Amino acid sequence: MTDPGSVQPIPIRLVLVDDHRMFRSGVKAELGESMVIVGEAADVDRAIVVVAQTRPDVVLLDVHLPGGNGNGGSDVISGSGGVSAESGQPVRFLALSVSDAAEDVIAVIRAGARGYVTKTINGNDLTSAIRRVADGDAVFSPRLAGFVLDAFGAAAGEVALIDEELDRLSTREREVMRLIARGYQYKEVAKELFISIKTVETHVSSVLRKLQLSSRHELTAWAVGRRLL
Amino acid sequence: MPYELSHSPTDPGQRRAVRRLERPTRGRYVAGVCAGLAEHLGLNVRQVRLTFILASLAGGVGIAAYLFLWALTPQSPEATAVPGTHAVAAGRQANESLRNFVVGLGLLLVGGVLFAQQHDVNLRLGVLIPLMTVAGGAVLAWSQLDDAERGRWLVRSGEGRRAGLLRLGVGIALASVGVVFLATQGRGLAGLWDVGIAAVAVLAGAALIAAPWGVRLWSDLRAEQAQRIRETERADIAAHLHDSVLQTLALIQRKADDPGEVTRLARAQERELRGWLYAGPRGSRASLASAVTQAAHEVEDLHGIPIELVITGDGPLDMGGTALVQAVREALINAVRHGAPPVSAYVEVGSERVEAFVRDHGPGFDIDDVPRDRLGVRKSILGRMSRNGGTAALRRLEHGTEVCLSLPVSIAGAQAEAAPDAQPDIEGTR
């Protein structure tokens, strides 16, 4: 839990947003003492109020929520735009879902979530995912990496010729995504590609940015057309 | 929920027990009045029919009584309540009896007219023919709006509905023409305008008064239909949840002391529910992705260890693909048996090659440790891949083992294309 690499003098302040009370208490029990849960909410409107009041570092956000405009987690993110944490950093969102439907996942990422994990994730992985998101990095589960490879046509061999191209992944980004899809941790990806963990994180963040900014029309059509992976 | 389930079957039963006077849809000649009456009073159908015929000869009392009962007796709901072959048969029979009725009536009329003319009775055909036209139109239109048929007509779409509309239209047109002729009797075309304008004015007034009522009736009907559809859907969902999720939850409670079994049950149920909620995730069963998914699920079920499966792209399942699926399956079995969770599998179906990676987090296996299994791996994974023009490699990672499989798509495609060509050659050499 306390690895010497990242000393956390101040525990991460966390808000839990999920409409299942049982799941919220389960998460609370699993998270270690490096996290402080400063607020909870069960629907979109309450979540926006709680986030504005408590100004947490990270919001753990269910993709499917009642209330708002009916878009669930995406509504919370757009409703909390401009809110910054007490540390001055913007509030970061980590999406959490049982859905696995590409449509929902892509929607919440495009709304601004920094990552996506499934609800079956174990406590340790969840803790490290939250920490990574709090540090401003992106968190990709193997499944999300698979979505990305599919949506950007990278699996079919489409690769960007210049890094700035938003509609395609670069060769390196594709490599990183493939390894994440294969179940590799960032550390293992770095070792495999002979690069530093920081570089891996940079690549992942850049993929996240492309996912959020790309106007690739296939992206939405793909996600809608394939409701499930 | 038990209430709802038991409620619907008893409903028709109760109705039958009361023995309401209804016109049955089967075994009828004209409109089923006699059959219904016989059923209701517990009499012989033939006797009832004979009575009506005899009464008809006595100054038409029978016909009047018949028409009266026809108008007031509802049709038995059987035809609409039981969809399928039964309803179709009943409908066909109803059609047949209607045809019998129309033909019989026509013959009767012609006979009557001829008879009357022979005896020099002034029939005033100028009145009779329009009257008949009106009556014919009314029968056509009303038969279309018959209580039982209305539901079928509204629900049914396409051909049946179009035919129904046509019948209704022809009926209304016939009746209107008859009324106009009746009204313009002996006044020629000039009078037609006055009568027409008056008729339109009256109709418009009636429509104005009846419109709100009609609209409300229509919207009520729509609401009722929507409600019924919603209820059916809800019952479907309830039935499904009852059969699957509730059963599994009961099983889990019973096996609470066996964590492995509980995990297995939960995973299997989760998959089943997912499949039901998002039906048809990847097209047909014969695709590479669905075959891999199925193989992974089987391994999961067999060993109770969850497998994180990610697939990108998809393709047809050919010979090479089948070999790849079997190799993946073998690798997964090895991973869950000898490795440690989390076990993950990634399959990438590209345009040039299909690649599959199966990874576990176990200590990794040694050649000397399990020589037999090793042989199994060599035969069922490495051998199978090389036979199909692909490659397989085993990698030992810091945490666990990874099996990497690769199969060129072009070779698999070429094999599939070559197969039909090869067939006649083989036959020729034989």
Image (cartoon, coloured by chain):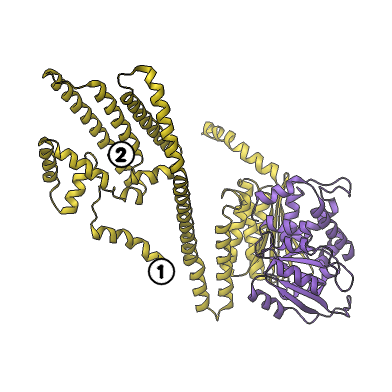
Camera sees residue B36: yes
Establish if B15 lies above or below A170: below
- Residue A102 drawn at (x, y percent): 68, 56
Which residue is labeled 1 in the image?
A: B2
Where on the picture, by quarter, is residue B165? Answer: top left
Question: A67 or B209, which is in the foreground?
Answer: B209
Establish if B198 lies above or below A198: above
Report the amino acid beneath label 2: Arg
Taking the spot 64% from the left edge, 72% from the top edge, the residue there is A20
- Residue B58 drawn at (x, y percent): 9, 37
Report the amino acid beneath label 1: Pro
Q: Return the chain for callout 2.
A: B
Question: What color was chain B assigned in the picture?
Answer: yellow
Q: Which chain is purple?
A: A
Question: A140 or B70, which is in the foreground?
Answer: B70
- Residue B424 drawn at (x, y percent): 54, 32
Q: Considering the image in quadrants, where does the N terminus of chain A appear?
A: bottom right
Q: Is residue B246 left or right of residue B350?
A: left
